[in-house]
Amino acid sequence: MSVARQVVVEADGGSRGNPGPAGYGAVVIDPATGEPLAEAAEYIGVATNNVAEYRGLIAGLTAAKALFPDAGDALRVHVRMDSKLVVEQMSGRWKIKHPDMKPLAARAAAILPPSSVTYEWIPRAQNKHADRLANEAMDAGRDGRQWEASASTAALDAPSARTVNIPPPPAPTTGSPGDHVAGAAKARAALAAARGATAPEADTLFPVPETGVPETGVPEAAAVPEPVGNSPEAAGTPQTGWGSAPDLGAPATLVLLRHGETALTPEKRFSGSGGTDPELSATGRGQAERAAEHFAALGAVQEIVSSPLRRCRETAATVAARLGLDVRIDEGLRETDFGAWEGLTFGEVRERYADDLTAWLASPDTAPTGGGESFAEVAERVAAARDRIVARYAGRTVLLVTHVTPIKTFVRLALGAPPESLFRMELSAASISTVAYYGDGNASVRLLNDTSHLR
């Protein structure tokens, strides 16, 4: 027969930017002596406060269960957090409305039987230990390393002999239950059916603009056929969502920065890799400076990789100088070669090459006039660049300075969207988008076309 055991879990998470560089911390405490039994902390890349807080809860519950693997239903865990949102949602008093929080709540609910866990909100001043752990994790991520328990001083902020009174479990709710009460059983069943799988969370939902013409001058177009053959989409694609395999630690986070303006940008002319390779304009140089200030303030970027084209190299050099980093060049990040259309507006191409333009808009396998690249060809080299970069920088945050088509392709492939989605996204000069890639092959789109740093 299992011996009853009670522990306290204190957990916290934070984000320097919301979303921004994020981390969590959790400590398992003996309620009788106040002594810490286990600590956990991790830098998780770019995320929101809520995601980091839920990740801290998950880590704390997991650590408590690992301490007493044979306790079974006799283990009682009292969770204390300064996040009113997490406490109320997990207690079943508030509904979970955000779709990205639901998988995290399900993960937490599946660790221990619901009857074994109680929740209490505490002021931040009483959650110093977990808060310090979360900040240690974020500091480690800023410095390009992972948090190490042996180097932690978080316990010094906590009283050396604190006792915790665990309140009795609350009476069952009789009104409309929250997501935790009403949906936890379904969530656990779904998790069990998926081999205990979890989906990587995204912290930001992005709206896809209804209109807009990118630098290439491509308008919203008619539907393009689904990919076939040996395109990146037709190859074996990792499972996603509830049916995915568990994520394998901190993701490779690719921060996708479009270069600053050139003289061709405001005129919406086709500007690819087969043209004049223009430099940044005065406006573009200012945009690069503001991007550099933004990334310096965030403190998350650990590596920089750039397209070989001049406008990207100049943008990357400006950011690198501010961050004290080197720039690596990857040919796979260059813009599409638009052949004979280079330097022309969309209207000029329509006047001179009407049939070729119609064919190009209708199929991702059609190249521009004069030996340019098709979108299918671009997708193949972007996918290859993605795989190289993710493998090289697993668990790190990498700034990729590149162009409209490669950035849209990163996002499209991450979403598993068809080629016509390229015509449904808008990317401003010097805008920021973010995609995270997990060790299990899953991807999470976290940001698209953010220009707040330019205002």
Image (cartoon, helix red, strand yellow):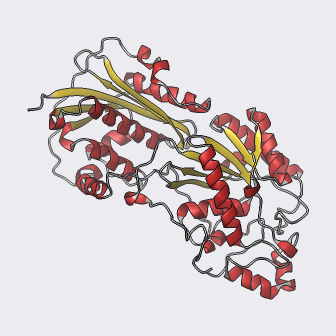
The image shows residue 374 at horizontal and vertical percentages of 73, 73
Looking at the rendering, which quadrant does residue 275 occupy?
bottom right
As drawn, the residue found furthest toward the left would be: 1
The image shows residue 4 at horizontal and vertical percentages of 14, 28
Looking at the rendering, which quadrant does residue 172 occupy?
top left
Looking at the rendering, which quadrant does residue 261 occupy?
bottom right
Taking depth in this image into account, of 132 and 43 the one nearest to the observer is: 43
- Quadrant (top left/top right/bottom left/bottom right) for the N terminus: top left
Q: Exactly how many numbered labels are in the figure? A: 0
Asked if 221 appears above or below 298 in the picture, the reply is: below
Q: Is residue 120 left or right of residue 397?
A: left
The image shows residue 209 at horizontal and vertical percentages of 62, 66
Q: In this view, does 327 lie to the left or right of 207?
A: right
In percent of the image, x 62 and y 29: which residue is there?
Answer: 143
Asked if 310 appears above or below 325 in the picture, the reply is: below
The image shows residue 114 at horizontal and vertical percentages of 21, 43
In percent of the image, x 76 and y 77: which residue is there?
Answer: 367
Q: In this view, does 454 lie to the left or right of 132?
A: right
As drawn, the residue found furthest toward the right would be: 276
In percent of the image, x 65 and y 58: which residue is there?
Answer: 384
Taking depth in this image into account, of 391 and 227 the one nearest to the observer is: 391
Asked if 301 appears above or below 308 in the picture, the reply is: above
As drawn, the residue found furthest toward the bottom would be: 355
Residue 406 visible in the shown view: yes
As drawn, the residue found furthest toward the top would be: 160
Q: Is residue 434 left or right of residue 261?
A: left
Residue 177 visible in the shown view: no
Taking depth in this image into account, of 276 and 259 the one nearest to the observer is: 276
